[in-house]
Image (cartoon, rainbow, N blue to C red):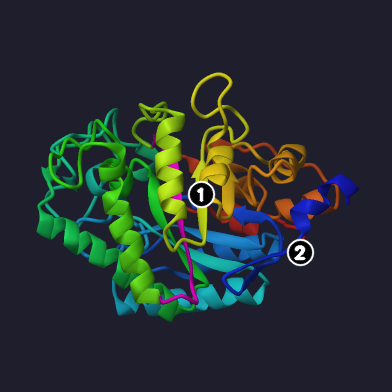
Amino acid sequence: MKEQHQPLFESKTINDRTFANRYVVAPMTRVSAENNGMPNDTMKKYYERYAKGGFGTVITEGVYPDERFSQGYPNQPGLANEAQRDAWKPIVKSVQEHGALFIAQIMHAGAQSQENPYAEHNIGPSQVAPKNDKLSFYGGEGPFPEPKRMSHDDIQTAVESFGRSAELAKEAGFDGVEIHGANGYLIDQFLTDYFNRREDEFGGDTKNRLRFALEVIKEVRKKVGKDFIVGIRISQGKASDADHRWALGESDADTIFSTLGSESLDYIHVTDDDAEKPGFGQGSMSMAEAAKKHSNIPVIANGKLADPEKAVYMLNNGHADFVSLGTSALQNPDAPKRIKQEKALEEFDFGSIMLPQAHIKDHELNKHIIV
C-alpha cells in the first residue's frame, strides 16, 4: 500500500461501532428482491461480496418502510413487516461475519414512486409531479403522475413508518439505519422549494421545509434508542432532476447542515456528482465541506471518489470522515483491497450492470474478487 493512502484504512468509532476503514458502499437500487419485497439469497451473495472485498461499511439500497405509499420500484426490498425483517437476518449476519458494518437505508419514495402495489396513487408534500420521465432501468416508463397532497395524518403516518422500520432494522441485527433524505424522495421533496408549496408548518422557508426530516429523525431515534447508528443522506440533485441546486446556495447549506448537526444523528452522508467540486457555484465549498463545517458531526462524502488520491484529499483536508463508492463499487466490489494492493480499478460498465434492468446479474456474483 502506498503510504499516502494510509488514512483510508484507519478505523474510526462512532456510537460504539468501529468502522474498520473509511470505505463505505453507497446505497444503490438493484430491484432484485421478491415481488413482495422479501430479500433473498441473490441479495445475500451480492452484499457479502463488498464485505469480503474490504469495505468497512455497507449501506443497503433504499428499503421501503410501510405497506402504503412508500415503495418506489418493483422488486424493491422492504423493511415494513416482521417477515421481511426475518428475511434480512441471514444477510446481515453474513455481511457482519465478513468484517463490515451493515446499515439499512430507509426510503419513502413519495411522489417519485415508479411502481407501488400497495397504493393506487402517489403522495407528496404538494400536488407537484417530479420533473422528467421515470427511469427505464428501474422498470419505469413515461412521466410521473401528479401526487395527492399529504394531509397531516399522512405526514404523521409516514413519520411513524420510518420509526417502525428502523425498529425492525435493529431487530434484524443491522448496525444502524440511514434515513434517505436525498435524491428527490419524500424527505427531499419536503425540502425542495418547487416540490413543497405548502403554507403550513411544513412549508415556506428552508427551516420549515426541513421540519419533516427533523420529525423523522426524532421518531427513528426514539424507536432505536441511543446505542444504534442513525445517519441521514442529503443531496441537491434528484433522480428526476439531477441538476437541481438549493436556491439560497451556501446559506441553505448553513441552515440545513447546522440544524441536522444539532439533532441526534451520528453522521451525514452527502452526495454530489463530484464530491470535490464547488457545490454552490464557482468558488464555493463542496457539499461535503459545507456539511462538515456546519454540522460538526462525521460526514460521508460521495461522488467520483474512486481515485484514492481524491479520497485521501477529502480526509486530510477535513472535508469528510469517510468516502462512499457507488458505481465504482458495483464494478469493483473489492475496491479497498485493490487499492491497498495497488491494483487498478476497472471502469464502470453501465450497460452490463444496469441494463436492460438494474437487477443483480449472475456475472456480478460470479466475478473473481480479491478476498
The numbered dot on residue 118 is: none
Is residue 18 part of the magenta span, yes or no?
no
What residue is rendered at 36% in x and 30% in y? Answer: 241
Q: Would you call the spot at circle 1 few (<14 residues within 10 Å), some (14-19), or many (20 or more)?
A: many
Q: Along the horizontal axis of the image, is 272 left or right of 157?
A: right
Measured along the vertical axis of the image, is residue 59 above or below residue 208?
Answer: below
Q: Along the horizontal axis of the image, is 65 left or right of 146?
A: right
Cα separation between marks 1 and 2? 36 Å
Task: List x then y, in percent, for residue 282.
Answer: 55, 18
Q: Is residue 40 visible?
A: yes
Front residue (pair 350, 361): 350
What residue is rendered at 32% in x and 53% in y? Answer: 213
Measured along the vertical axis of the image, is residue 253 above or below residue 1?
Answer: above
What residue is rendered at 90% in x and 49% in y? Answer: 3
Residue ranking furthest to the top: 282
Front residue (pair 116, 164): 164
Q: Return the disc, 1 or 2, that comes first in the chain's sequence.
A: 1
Q: Is residue 78 visible?
A: no
In the image, which residues are magenta? 225-238
Is residue 230 part of the magenta span, yes or no?
yes
Residue highlighted by disc 1: 295
Task: List x then y, in percent, for residue 117.
Answer: 20, 57
Q: Circle 2 sits in a helix, a strand or a loop, which is it? A: loop
Measured along the vertical axis of the image, is residue 163 above or below residue 59?
Answer: below
Residue highlighted by disc 2: 371
Task: List x then y, in percent, for residue 177.
Answer: 45, 65
What residue is rendered at 22% in x and 36% in y? Answer: 144
Residue type, label 1: Ser
